[in-house]
Image: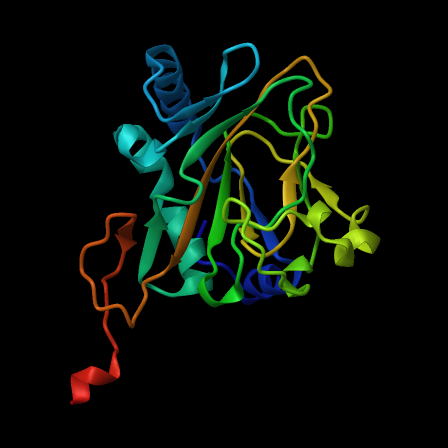
Amino acid sequence: MPFLSPNQSSFFRRAGYLKLRSLIHEDLIEYVRSAIDEELTARKPPFKLNDAGAIYRLDGLYKRGETFKQLMTLPELLDSVESLVGPNIELTLNRHNHLAINRPGETIERLHRDILQWTRGIVTAIFYIEDASMANGCTLILPTSQYLPFIGTPNNGGTWMDEHSVFNDLAEQAIPIHAEKGDILLVDSLAFHTAGKNNSCLTRMSIAAGYHSVDELDGLQQHEKRVLVRGQRIYRGNDLKL
């Protein structure tokens, strides 16, 4: 897929999300599935376990091998992200950067934002490694909710909608985003969204990554918690003129 069209970019900015169809090639999906199986078998931290001792979230994915790096730096995906944030793009290592396995009956629907404030937003990308439907817990999103008030209460880096009564009248307005294996969903990090409840006998496996523009004011060329995936780390601080 080429860069986003003006209509697609406008829709993302207004609605808070955009689905990209069949962006991940079937061969790459199979490589990713094999890499996931290896990581689940190795049980190398960091990861999170369910009550039965099975891994439902595998963190630090970018540094777990070239296959995951290849997925998170797909040129077609970066083209789309560039249409939204510009040509100098960083991948965050401390937000998302994980595999999520939505197993039958385990997931609790809980609408949330990925960050607290609009001043340093990210574009969240959800890579669908398996089909996602209402039955097995597809993503739910509250359109245009990136424009709702900011609460500013820290809670693991995000804002949980059910913790703030100001949002009560919108809790039932989220819509399901059906996706097929190979699709990628782009989400404004301030739009409320959640994984749906899995009522099927199948898993729903996805990978999440977060992207933002290079910070033109920090002047740092190396970052421990983010990696440059396109362009360069530009600096536009006023101290250059001193």
**Looking at the picture, how far across and down is residue 155, in whole percent?**
55, 47
**Viewer-proximal residue, 179 or 163?**
163
Q: Pinpoint residue 175: horizontal percent, then vertical percent.
A: 75, 44
Residue occupying image coordinates x 76% and y 59%? 166
Q: How many tags in the picture?
A: 0
Pinpoint residue 225: horizontal percent, then vertical percent. 29, 48
Point out the residue furthest to the bottom here. 242
| The quarter of the displayed image where residue 93 is located | top left
User: What is the image's colouring?
Assistant: rainbow
Name which residue lies at 47% across and 67% down: 119
**Residue at x 23% of width, y 62% of height:** 232
In this picture, is 14 found above or below 162?
below
| Residue 42 shown left or right of residue 57 in the figure | left
Q: Quadrant of the C terminus?
A: bottom left
126 to the left or right of 77: right
Residue 52 lies, with reference to residue 116, above or below; the image says above
Q: Is residue 229 above or below residue 36?
A: below
Q: Position of residue 110 (x, y in %)?
A: 68, 39
Residue at image coords 48%, 54%: 123
